[in-house]
Image: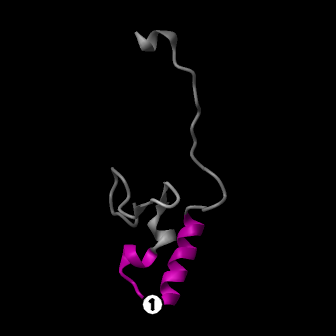
Amino acid sequence: MLVSRRRKGACTALRWSDADQRYWCGMVADPGGVTGLSHPWAVRALSALARRWIASGVGCDARLDAQAPHPTDSL
């Protein structure tokens, strides 16, 4: 929400990587491209902050409880 200034929809910093076949956070992978900053120290600092804010490499922190579908839901 802070980067894209949106409450709904995809974050504007979300970037697709053809090489990795997955999405990356642009604030981690390319903060200069997302923010327009070009100073190397600022880009490195933003990337480090973004990694910390989203806990990159730590694992998923989503609070999801998977439940089997109810048999009548498919009718």
Mark 1 residue type = His
> Where 65 falls versus 70 (above or below)?
below
Q: Quadrant of residue 63?
A: top right
Looking at the image, what colour scheme do you see? one colour
Count the labels in the image.
1
Q: Which residues are magenta?
A: 31-53
Number of residues whose C-alpha sits closer than 10 Å to that of mark 1, classed few (under 14), some (14–19) or many (20 or more): few
| Foreground of the two, 18 or 35 | 18
- The x, y position of residue 66, in whole percent, is 58, 30
Tell me, yes or no, whether the highlighted magenta stretch contains residue 9.
no
The answer to which image quadrant residue 56 occupies is bottom right
- Which corner quadrant of the image does residue 3 belong to? bottom left
According to the image, label 1 marks what residue? 39
Which residue is painted at 57% across and 68% down in the image?
51
Residue shown at the point (43%, 13%) measured from the top left: 74
| Magenta stretch: helix, strand or loop mostly | helix
Helix, strand or loop status at disc 1: loop
* Residue 20 position within the rendered picture, expressed as x and y whole percent measured from the top left: 53, 58
Image position, residue 67 (x, y; %): 57, 25
Q: Quadrant of the C terminus?
A: top left
For the view shown, which residue lies furthest in the front direction?
19
> Looking at the image, which residue is at 48% across and 63% down?
25
> Considering only vertical position in the picture, is 44 above or below 18?
below
Asked if residue 72 is positioned above or below residue 16 in the image, the reply reads above
| Quadrant assignment for the N terminus | bottom left
Q: Is residue 33 magenta?
A: yes
How far from the left and from the top, in percent, is residue 18? 45, 59
